[in-house]
Amino acid sequence: MNIVVCVKYVPDAQSERAFREQDKTVDRDAVDGLLSEVDEYAVEEALKIVEASEGEVTVLTVGPAQAADAIKKALQMGADKGVHVCDDAIHGSDAAATSLVLAEAIKKATDGSPELVLMGMTSTDGVMGVVPAMVAERLGMPQVTFASELTIEGGSLRARRDGDAASDTIEASLPALVSVTDQINEPRYPSFKGIMAAKKKPVEQWTLADLGVDAGAVGIDAAWTKVIDVAKRPPRAQGTIVKDEGDGGTKLAEFLAAGKFL
Amino acid sequence: MAPVQRLMPTEIGEELIELTRDICAKELAPRVDEAERRARDNGEFPREVFDILGRAGLLSLPQPEEYGGAGQPYEVYLQVIEEIASVWMSAAVGTSVHSLTAYPILTFGTPQQRTALLPDILDGTRIGAYALSEQGAGSDIGSMTTRATRDTESASESDSESDTGSTSEREGDGGAGGEGYRITGRKAWISHAGHADYYTTFARTADSGGRGLSCFIVPGDAKGLSFGQPERTMGLHADIVREVMYDQVEVSADRRIGAEGQGMAIALAALDAGRLGISAAATGLAQAALNVASAYARERQQFGRAIGEFQGLAFLLADMQAAVSSARATYLYAARLKDAGRPFGAEAAAAKLIATDAAMRVTTDAVQVLGGAGYTSDFPLERYMREAKVTQIFEGTNQIQRLVISRHLLGG
């Protein structure tokens, strides 16, 4: 089975992140980026599936030039080839536009007939979690989101979805799109051999024109939402001190209830 | 704390450092405290460290690719060791020791021995111990008493079980013919003893002092091999150290590395390279101590300001930084000589001397910066200080390093 894994290049959460003054988008030049950690689970799951049977894993990303690093990491882990959609017009795209570009790129990468598409359940920067559902809709595929276990059997798949109270087991026919949680596996590290092998693996560079996507349909001007202003989180305020005058327990409970912790 | 600035000679080198930092942060750092404690209290050996490093290919960076290594220069390999040491000293020393045990096979073994032995060693499937020192033969290797005697009968037995099969392989390995050996004696201070899969063992084959030694690869499950209790050491607990006892241990002739009598030359050549690993590890340990101390000096307030603003501590920290930088520069210089195929023995000895003395001083001063807090195990500095001490002792004491350097300088 051939699998397309959609991955995102995100700013390193360890570093100081900021927004650009002119359009309030994330300042990508100011921080180091990396392969979104949740996407490592999607890559790992794809590798496990093809290792157990056969097929190829294609890693797809939409992002600026530096996003090639996210593809490189996935190739070092063992994916077979990469597709990088890079076009200045994409800058500032919202989730809907991102899903459009991803869907068209998936079609092009699979000659119109994808078998299985894997994604992380959400990115670690935007944390919207809607792109998998949107891509599935655009491709007309069953969407199985938040999978914490995945089995492929013949023409269908079975996935476990953990809720607060119970777990669901969901079956879907292939082709399908599955988004995975960080419970599904333990992603491997690249190895020296993986790093060497990645250098010889093909990575295709596509623009919007290659995908037949109208530049007016994506980017910051086409976005359905607009960021008006950003502000730094205020410094931590002085905490509340509850003095126990025999009613300390009650006051503590009231404090917790006011904050909806109880 | 920003990571150490490194000038790597290649893009691959940069990627290996990135991979190492990732593995150190996510796999080694969460394990170190618990594993060191379990090793100290129960003698448990953290074998999983070798599995993790082996899978990533980090146990075999300097060895050639044809045997499963990464073919990387020492300039890259040693900086990886330094990165590992800055998170877990025992893991870095373990990696260096493992490389040391493979060195004789790689450098003095026959092509058949290399093909038969190295792949499993280099991917971490089998880990090694280096059995050279004895209670009565520490710095004075030539006085060792562990003896290997030729034994025709045992050789024919072990030949039939030999994993390399063909008997023709032994031709050209120095004319040992079909004979095997029986090794009897005791080795002391052996890292990984009782847990290693093979022992790179030096034993006497003739009564001619340093010229009568030979090198053997002894399987860890050989009959007659036994081990003492783990030594109660001051630090570096996860580097389990014990005595190794050999009682008529049979070794087939095709597991002798090099010619009879070549043992001393093999041991010393391996140590030249091994010392570079220890230099890099000591540098990483010193860097780790400096990181903790400088972060603390920025945070800790006394007399209304950060203690780092007092010149007394600022200059102490500056001296620590200078010591770490010179340790790193010195081992990298020796590494570049080795990579270029030049003689590097004196420079490796100087690197070992400078880097391990720096580690001792920097870790001690780091405890001083933290004061009482540094003396407690709430911070890792007291552990770093205990671990630094042994680096001045093992793989040739720093007195022996001075001997090596002065002999290179003055001859003799």
Image: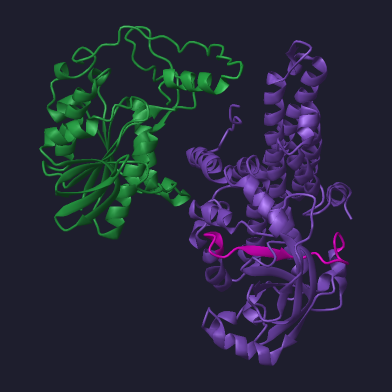
**Point 68% across, 64% down: residue:** B129
Q: Nearer the viewer, residue A150 or B202?
A: A150
Q: Is residue A31 above or below residue A189?
A: above
- Residue B137 within the magenta-colored segment of the rendering: yes
The location of residue A70, given as percent across then percent down, is 36, 35
Which quarter of the rendered picture does the C terminus of chain B lie within? bottom right
The quadrant holding residue B330 is top right
Q: Which residues are magenta?
A: B121-140
Q: Residue furthest bottom?
A: B153
Of the chain colours in the picture, the one used for chain B is: purple
Asked if one can make out residue B138 in the rendered structure from this viewpoint, the answer is yes
The location of residue A68, given as percent across then percent down, is 35, 32
Q: Is residue B393 left or right of residue B342?
A: right
Of the chain colours in the picture, the one used for chain A is: green
Q: Is residue A180 left or right of residue A171?
A: right
The quadrant holding residue A52 is bottom left
**Point 15% across, 19% down: residue:** A217
Q: Is residue A32 above or below residue B48?
A: above
Q: Is residue A221 left or right of residue B405?
A: left
Which quarter of the rendered picture does the N terminus of chain B lie within? top right
Majority SS type along the magenta span? loop
The quadrant holding residue B249 is bottom right
Q: Is residue B220 above or below residue B331?
A: below
- Residue B44 within the magenta-colored segment of the rendering: no
The location of residue A19, given as percent across then percent down, is 39, 13
The location of residue B384, given as percent across then percent down, is 74, 41
Q: Is residue B411 left or right of residue B315?
A: right
Q: Residue furthest front?
A: A246
User: What color scheme is it?
Assistant: by chain
Tag count in the figure? 0
**Point 22% across, 55% down: residue:** A152
Asked if one can make out residue B178 in the rendered structure from this viewpoint, the answer is no
